[in-house]
Image (spheres, rainbow, N blue to C red):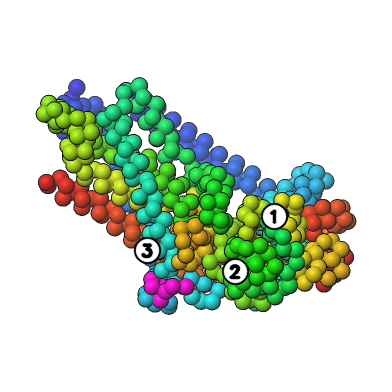
Amino acid sequence: MRRAVSTGTALVSACLVVAALAVSGCGGSNARTNEVVVTGSTTILPIAEVSAEMFKEKNPDTSVLVSGVGSSAGIESVSTGSSDIGTSSRDLKPEEENLGLADTPIAYDAIAVIVNKDNPVKSLSKQQVKAIFEGKITEWSDVGGLDGSIHIVNRDEASGTREAFSKIVMDKEPFDPAAAVLPGTGQVRAVVAEAPGAIGYISFGFLNDSVKAIAVDGVMPSVETVFSGAYPIQRTLHFFTKGAPTGLTEEYIDYVLSPAIQDTVVPDAGFLPVSQGGK
Amino acid sequence: VASPNGENTKSGDLQLVSRWTYIKETLLKNTFLACAFVAVMGVALIFVFIGVRGWPVFTEVGAGNFLLGRVWSPSNEQFGILPLIWGTVLVMAGALVLGTPLAVATAIFLSEIASPRVRSIVRPAVELLAGIPSVIYGFFGLVMLRPIFADVSGGLGFGAATAWVILAIMIVPTIAALSEDALESVPNGIREASYAMGATTWQTISRVLLPAAKVGIIDAIILGMGRAIGETMAVLMVVGNAPVFPKDVFSPLSTLTTQIVMDMPYAVGIHRTALFGMAIILFLVSMFLVAAVRLISRLGGED
C-alpha cells in the first residue's frame, strides 16, 4: 500500500514537471517574436536605451533588450544570431566583412582627448597626442605643461572608442603597452578627473565638467566643430543586422532613425544625427 | 523484524524492513556516488576542454616564445606571457607577505587569546570577509584605496601595491580559518604542559603551539596562495591591466587571470588559443598547489 502511494506521488510530480517545462517552453517562444535584442558598443548605449524605452511606450506588447558589452562583442553576437542588432562605434574589420552584416549608420561621434582640470595644457597637435599615447613623449613639460610624468589611461582592445582612436589618431601604431587599460568610458573619465598627470580619451557624448577637453590641432571638440568636420577625431556609429533588418527589428531601427530620436535623443547624448553628419 | 535478504541484520544499525527500503538505500548510495562523480567529471572535462583548446599554442607560437616571451601584443601576433607570469607572482607574493602575518595572528588570537565573548564577535566578522563578493573588494579598491596610492605615488594608483592590500584582506579568512583549525587540533595537554613548566602565553604560542601546528599553517598559506593567484575580478579593477613588466609597484601591470578576462570578449584565432594556454598554466599551478598541500600533510603526519 505504501509503495503504491509513493509510486503514485512520483508519477504525479513527474507529470507536473513535464507540464511546467511545456508551459515555460511555450512562453519562451511567444516572447521571442515580440523581442529585439540589442547588444554592443557602450558608446551607443545611451541612444539605444532611451529609444528602446520610448519604443516600448509606443508598442506596449514588445520588449527591446539593450546591453553594452563593447563593439567587437556586439558584432560577434549579431553574426552568431545571439542578438538581433549589434551596435558598433567602429567600422567592420576586413575579416568581419563577409559575415553578411547589413550596416545602418545611426549617428556621428567625436572622440575628445581629456586631461585633469588642474592641467594647464589647453591644446595639442594630433601628432603630439599620437606621440603621447605611443609613449614617446612622457613629460608634461615637453608639451607646455607643468613638471611631472604623463600618465596614460587607455581603453581595452574590445572598445570601439579605442579602435576608432587607434585608426584616426595613431595611424594603427601601437599604444604604449605600459599604459593603464580600463574597461569602460566612465572609469577613464573618473580616473582622469582625479589624477593630475593623467590623459585619456572618451566619446564626445560622455564629456562633462569633471574633466577638461583638449583642443586638437587648435580645434575644440563641440557640436559645431564636429558637424563642420573641423574637429579631426570623429567617427560613425553603426547598427549591424544579419542581412537587411525585418519585422520588429526593422521597426525599431526605423524608430531610431526617425526625428523623434534623431532630433532629441541623439543630440542630448552628445552625438550628431545621421541626417546632418558631416564627414 | 525479519529482513527478506538477510543482510546487515547482525550489525543492528541498518534494519531492512522490506525490499522497497533496500532499493531505496541502494538508490541513495548510487545517487551520492553520482554526485561525487559529477565533481570529478567536472574537473576532468574542464581539464580536457582547456587542454584541447589551449594546446596548439605550444606548437603554433612555441613553448619558448609563449612562456618566456617578454611582449604580450596580440594585435602584433606576439604572445609572450612572461610579463603576465611575473605580474601574477608579484601580486601573489606581496599579498602573502602582507596577509599571512595578519591571518596567522588572527588565528592565534581566536584560538589562544580571545575570550569566548570576543571570539563570538571576531570569528563571524572574519568569516564574513570570505562571503563578500570579490567585485565589492575590487570596487572598494578602485574607489577608496586607488586614490590614496595615487596621491602617495603621484601616478594613477593602479599597480601591484594596491592589489596587495586588497588581496591581503581577501586571503585572511582562508588562512585564518585553516590556521585556527590547526592550532585547535593541538592537544590541550601540550598547552597545559607548557604552562606548567612556567612558560608565558607568548612562549607557549611561539615555542610550542606554532611548531606543533606548523604543517596545518603551511597548508593554509598554500591554499591562500591559490586564492591569491586565482583571484580575478578584484585584481582586475586595481592593477591597471598593462601587460608589461611594471617599473615599480605603483605602475600598471597585468596578471594571467586579469588578462584572460580583458581579452576574452574579442579574442579570435591564435589569440584565443593563447588565452586557453594561459588557463592551462593556471590549472597546472593550482594542481601543483593542491599536490603540495597533500604532500606536506602526509610528510608532516609522519614526523
The residue that mark 3 highlights is B281
Rendered view: B24 above or below A275: above
Q: What amino acid type should be assigned to the residue bearing mark 3?
A: Ile
Which three-letter amino acid code belongs to the residue tagged 1? Asp
Do the residues indicated by labels 3 and 1 lie within the same chain of the protein? no
Disc 3 crowd rating (10 Å Cα; few below 14, some 14-19, many 20+) is some
Q: Whole-Å distance between the Cαs marked 3 and 1?
A: 45 Å
Say whether residue A40 is magenta.
no
Nearest the viewer among B66 and A175 is: A175
The residue identified by callout 1 is: A118
| Chain letter for mark 3 | B
Q: Are marks 1 and 2 on the same chain?
A: yes
Q: Tell which tag, 3 or 2, sits nearer the viewer.
A: 2
Q: Which residues are magenta?
A: B65-71
Name which of mark 1 and mark 2 comes first in the sequence: 1
Location of the N terminus of chain A by quadrant is top left
Q: Can residue B54 be seen from the camera position used here?
A: no
Instruction: Point out residue A273 in the picture as x, y percentages from the top left corner.
Output: 84, 61
As measured in the structure, the alpha-carbon distance from the residue carrying label 3 to the one carrying label 2 is 35 Å
Residue assigned mark 2: A138
Tell me residue B144's x, y (percent): 55, 44
Question: Residue A13 at what x, y percent from top left?
Answer: 47, 34
Q: Which mark is residue A212?
A: none
- Residue at x-position 77% and y-position 49%: A50
